[in-house]
Amino acid sequence: MDKDQVRKTVEQLVESHYDQRQIQSRLRHFQDASEPPLAPSKFESLEAFLDFYGREQGHEDSIESLKTEHTRATEQYDQARLALSWVLPMNVPLYYTYEGDREELKDQQYEIMNVSSAGQGQIVIAPSPAQP
């Protein structure tokens, strides 16, 4: 892996880690704030049933969409952590200030560490205070 690929991999790791956390938070918030519609004791008409069915599908689609986003972010994270575990020495922290294009991550600082043997994919990432 060349230096540019390593840089992109670190950015992917940070971005996908952030995305996982944000999506998980959005999913929890949605589930806490939005219950699926309750079925009435009867449907007075086809239109009443279709209205209920549409709301029910909308609720389920929202949850599935968030789960799909989370799966994508997890796959990106797993890919980056595995690749990085091949090049980052074990138990040596990397202090990284985000340099990518995502505005919400600008100037965020992280400590990234490989805690396993090469290729095992055990990467720890945590917010970090500024380094001297």
Image: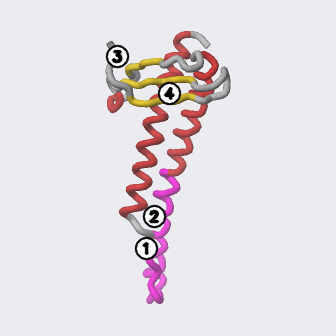
Residue 61 vs 131, above or below: the answer is below
Q: Which mark is residue 37?
A: 1
Verify CB contact (< 8 Å) between mark 3 and mark 1.
no
Disc 3 versus disc 2: nearer the observer: 3
Give the mark nearest the N terminus, 2 or 4.
4
Mark found first going from the N terminus, 3 or 1: 1
Disc 2 marks which amino acid?
His
Q: Which residue is mark 3?
A: 131
Q: Which region of the structure is painted magenta?
A: 38-66
Mark 2–mark 1 distance (CA, rounded to whole Å): 8 Å
Nearer to us of marks 2 and 4 is: 4
CB atoms of marks 2 and 1 within 8 Å: yes
* Residue that carries the numbered disc 4 in the rendered image: 12
On the image, numbered disc 2 is attached to which residue? 59
Of marks 2 and 1, which one's residue comes earlier in the chain? Answer: 1
- The amino acid sitting under disc 3 is Gln
**Percent from the top left, x then y, of residue 57?**
49, 66
Residue 98 is inside the magenta segment: no
Of the 4 image quadrants, the one containing the N terminus is top right
Looking at the image, tell me whether mark 3 or mark 2 is earlier in sequence order.
2
